[in-house]
Image (cartoon, rainbow, N blue to C red):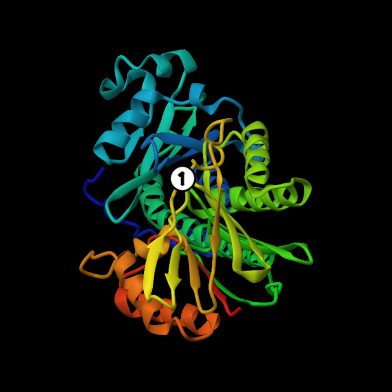
Amino acid sequence: MTGPQPELPVANPEHLAILYEITRTLNSSLELNTVLENIMDRVINVTKAERGFLMLRNDASGELEFRVARGMHRSDLESPEFQVSTTIVKKVQETLIPLLTDNAQFDERLMGGGSIMILGLRSILCVPILVRAQLIGLVYVDNRLHVGLFNEGHLDLLVAFASQAGTAIENARLYQVAVEKGRMEKELQMARDIQRGLLPRELPTLPGYEIAADWKSAREVAGDFYDCFELDSQTLGVVIADVSDKGAPAAIFMAVARSLIRSASISTASPEAALRQANLTLLKDTQSGMFVTVYYSLLRPGGQIVGVNAGHNRPLLYRIRTKTHEFLPRGGRPLGWFEDLPVKPLSYQLEPGDVLVYYTDGLTEAENIRREPFGEDRLVEVVRTFAARPAEDILKAITTALETFMGDAPPFDDTTLVVIRYTG
C-alpha cells in the first residue's frame, strides 16, 4: 500500500525537545518488542491519552495486528481488537492520512461507526507509520471521558514521532532478521559437522581393493551419504544413497537411513535382507513421505562383488583388460515407498585393474551455465583415461572434471562418489 508521506511540521520548541528525547529512547534498543513498548509508552505520556494501541502490518497476510495495547500507568489491555474504532483504523489504513477528532460521537466523518458509539469514544488520534511510503503500522490513542483532549500540536508531534518510530521498527526488524540468520547459520554449520561426522573418517581396508570416497552438499546439509564398514574379516559392506529431498529434512532422514542400513547389515545374512529390514523400519517409524535410493555391495577377496540396487543410479564398471565399460542394472525401488522391496543380488567378478564407480545423480545431472548435463559419457571418458591410476587419483580426476565442466554454475544437488579399484 502506497500513499503520500506525511509532512513533519514540528516547529514548537517544546515538541522538538520531546521528539529528540523520544528518538533517543527509541534508538536505545534493537529488540523489537522493547522498541514497540517504548513507542507506546512515550506516546501515551506525551498525549496524556487514556489508552494507546500500536499495530504492525503482517508481511505474510497484509493485515494489521495488535502488538502493544496500553492503558495509563503502562498497564496492558486485553482483547484490543474490541476496544478501538475499526472505522478510524480502516480509514487511516486506506488513505494513509492521519486522523484527529476531538469528539467522535458527533464527528460527521465518522457517522455510522458502531464501535465509536458502543465504546463511548470521544477524543481519538490515529497516525500511520510509514517507511518509504509503505504502511507498516498505526499508532492509535483515545480517551473515552474527555472531548478536545488532542489538538493539532499533538497531531503534528505524533506524525513526526511516527516517522522516527518507523525507522526504529525497521532497524529492530532488520536486527532481528540478522540475529536469526546468524543463529540458523550456526545451527546449520553444527548440523553439517554432525552429518560429516556420520560419514566414515577412515575407510576400512580389504586386501586387493582400493577405495576412495567424496561427499559434497549443495546446501549446508545434504541428503546424500556413503558408508563403508567391516562385516567380517573377509567382507566389506559399501553403501551409497540419495534421499529424495534436500536440506535439513533430508539430512535428518539421511542420518536415520544410514543407521538403519548399517545395523540391519550387521544383523542379517544378506544385503537384500538388510535393505528389506531397513525399509520396513523406515515405513514404520517415519511419516515424512521421503524415500532413499540405495546401492549396497559386498566386497570379498578375489574380486568377488555382490551388488543390490534399490532404485539408485547405475554404477559404472570399467574393465581395464578389454577397455570396455558397462552400467550395472538399476533394479528394485527406493526404501521408504512400499513394504514390498523387490531387490535381488547380482554377482560380479572383477579382474585386476577393474574399476567400479558408485555415484549419486548430483554428478551426472550437474549442469554448466549452458544447462548441459555432465552426463554418463563424460564420466566414462574420465574413468577410461585414469583407470590405471590408484582409486584416489581416479576420484580426484572425476571431481576435477566436474568442477571444470560446471564452471560458475551453482550446484543444484548433492554429489557423492565412491571409487573402488581391484588391484588383485
Query: On the rendered image, what quadrant is the N terminus found in?
Result: top left
Seen from the viewer's position, the closer of residues 79 and 314 is 314
367 vs 212, left or right, is left
Residue 422 to residue 341: above or below: below
260 vs 373, left or right, is right
Query: On the rendered image, what quadrant is the C terminus found in?
Result: bottom right
Residue 145 to residue 160: above or below: above
Residue found at x 31% / y 65%: 375
Tag 1: amino acid: Gly
Q: Give x and y (percent) for residue 256.
A: 66, 48
Q: Give x and y (percent) for residue 316.
A: 43, 65
Crowd tier of the residue under label 1, counting other residues whose Cα lies within 10 Å: few below 14, some 14–19, many 20 or above: some
Q: Quadrant of the rendered structure where residue 100 is?
A: top left
Residue found at x 23% / y 64%: 371
The answer to whether residue 114 of the structure is visible from this angle is yes
Q: Give x and y (percent) for residue 287.
A: 59, 33
The answer to whether residue 415 of the structure is visible from this angle is no
216 vs 306, left or right, is left
Seen from the viewer's position, the closer of residues 248 and 415 is 415
Q: Give x and y (percent) for residue 18.
A: 49, 59
Residue picked out by circle 1: 331
Q: Report how many numbered discs are placed on residues in the image.
A: 1
Residue 150 to residue 307: above or below: above
Seen from the viewer's position, the closer of residues 408 and 168 is 408
Seen from the viewer's position, the closer of residues 154 and 63 is 63
Looking at the rendered structure, the secondary structure element under dot 1 is loop
420 vs 313, left or right, is right
